[in-house]
Image (cartoon, rainbow, N blue to C red):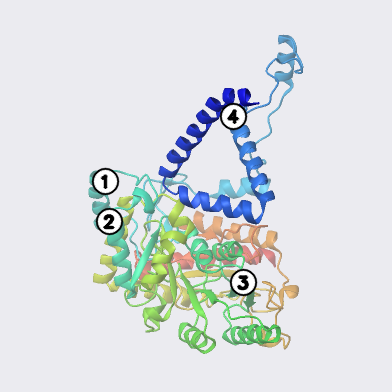
Amino acid sequence: MESASATLEPLFSFMARSLHMLEFAFNKLPGSAVIQRYIRSSHQNDPGRTILEIILIIFAIRTLLQSRTRADRTGKHFIQFSDKEIDELVEEWTPEPLDPPLTLAEKADLAAVPVVAGPNGPKPKLVSTGKNAINLASFNFTGLAGNESVKHSAVETLRKYGLGSCGPPGFYGTLDVHMDLERDIADFLGTEASILYSQGFSTISSVIPAFCKRGDIIVADRGVNFAIHKGIQISRSTVRWFDHNDPKSLEDVLDSVEKDRKKRGGPLTRRFIITEGIFEKDGAMVDLPKLIDIKYKHKYRLILDETFSFGTVGRTGRGLTELYNVPAEKVDILVGSVAIGLCSAGGFCAGSQAVVDHQRINGTSFVFSASLPALLAVSASEGINILRSSPSILSTLQENVRAARAILDRVDCISIPSHPASPIIHIHIRSSSSSLQPSTASFALSPKPSNPASPLPRDATTWDWDIESEERLLQDVVDEALAQGVMITRARRLRGQETVEARPSVRLALTSALTKKETEKAVNVVKNALVKVLARRR
């Protein structure tokens, strides 16, 4: 026994020295004491957990070391084809189209789109006729498209910075001209700060989910645009709807939300009112002072989308806050379009410094999209300078709006839901049963309130218009006006994708780049086209 112990003693001594050296080396590692304490406490309190962790570590090491694929490398289980069979299979294969083929209606719509030769503007040249046409289809409200001063600034910026930014703003896509534009927008609107987005559509659809989360309350207008609907959908918040542009309905819904919360004993959550300044679907305008009063009364935050009111209303184009003389800081989150209001590209969100800073890491479109090209940022800044120094642009625009409405309001076969000051005018075919449009009809006619949980208004079952037939009639109006040298368009919709299908309409986009006489001439052509085409229906 003693001889056996003497034989193994050198081995035990070697193992003891090795373990001591390993322990000494391990103790030199940063954090080794923490690991030792964790292993001791884990083994002491739950030895089974230590065994499970060792098994998981072994499994992880085995997974990392084994082959990435388990395919049969020998190929003995593969079906072997001859060259002739392979050729026959290739000849028989017919690839499926990436998109379904266009329908007859889609082909007709595509063929009806006029093609412009050269730059767009108030009087572009048409390829089909070689003549200039008056443009009431493009969103060139302030006439900045094609402005020589803007063009010169853009060219100089292109030579200095190149074309694209090549990166998202939070990485290396932010340039000094982007920060200049954000300061210009904030100073122009009278807010603490603003943030710039590179796509107009994704601005509001990124802003909403940046602030509204699961469990929060959103009370939204039933007439909001498609981008707002997508932002609300992404947010996964609890949504309640109020009747289109109806403050009384809004207050009723806010009262019902609070009553339901107290009944359930639920906690206070973040609560938002979401609406538009000028609605894209029908050109109606919100009563901002009334909305501000309701917001403060019920303690909600207001998200106001001024995509179509920024750069179009107010003495210098600052939007509804200037038109109604409401301080911009009373609107918690103010969203606008640089593409529409300033004839550039992208969008912005203005508000407090905290609101803006929050979006720099939570606004999905800001974080993951490449920033705006430098030349477009400079073009927008130049556009703001022009609006500041030339208030006559907005007064000319409003003069043209009044001239157009004076002509169109006398046409019996149509109805116009748009606000009298809105430069975007929607024209509906007058319903045979009512002179009011379903989207803007007086809801006082029905004592039964709409269901706040549904985006459909209470009178949706009474809508008596047919989308396909009205779109065909309105397209005939568009074609007739184009034949007389005036470009207008039907309001384009994503049929089948929108939550509430908007009624077909002809949309006019007035511009300050035309004189009052030119506007009256063009609108008279539209009026004659409406009377001529709609007379056939009778």
- Between marks 4 and 1 in the image, the one whose residue lies nearer the viewer: 4
Does residue 427 lie above or below 126 as drawn? below
Residue 204 in picture, x, y percent from top left: 49, 64
- Between marks 2 and 4 in the image, the one whose residue lies nearer the viewer: 4
* Residue type marked 1: Tyr
Of pointers 3 and 1, the one earlier in the residue sequence: 1
Cα–Cα gap, marks 3 and 1? 45 Å
Q: In the rendering, which numbered label is found on residue 329? A: none
Q: In the rendering, which numbered label is found on residue 161? A: 1
Q: Which residue is mark 4?
A: 65
Of pointers 2 and 1, the one earlier in the residue sequence: 1
Left/right of residue 353 with respect to residue 280 in the rendered view: left
Does residue 169 lie above or below 97 as drawn? below
Left/right of residue 202 with respect to residue 341 in the rendered view: right
Cα–Cα gap, marks 2 and 3? 38 Å
Q: In the rendering, which numbered label is found on residue 215? A: 3
Cα–Cα gap, marks 2 and 4? 51 Å
Q: Which residue is mark 2?
A: 177
- Is residue 112 in view from this perspective? yes
Q: Residues within 10 Å of mark 4 (few under 14, many from 20)?
A: few
Q: Are marks 2 and 1 in contact (CB under 8 Å)?
A: yes
Residue 371 in picture, x, y percent from top left: 38, 52
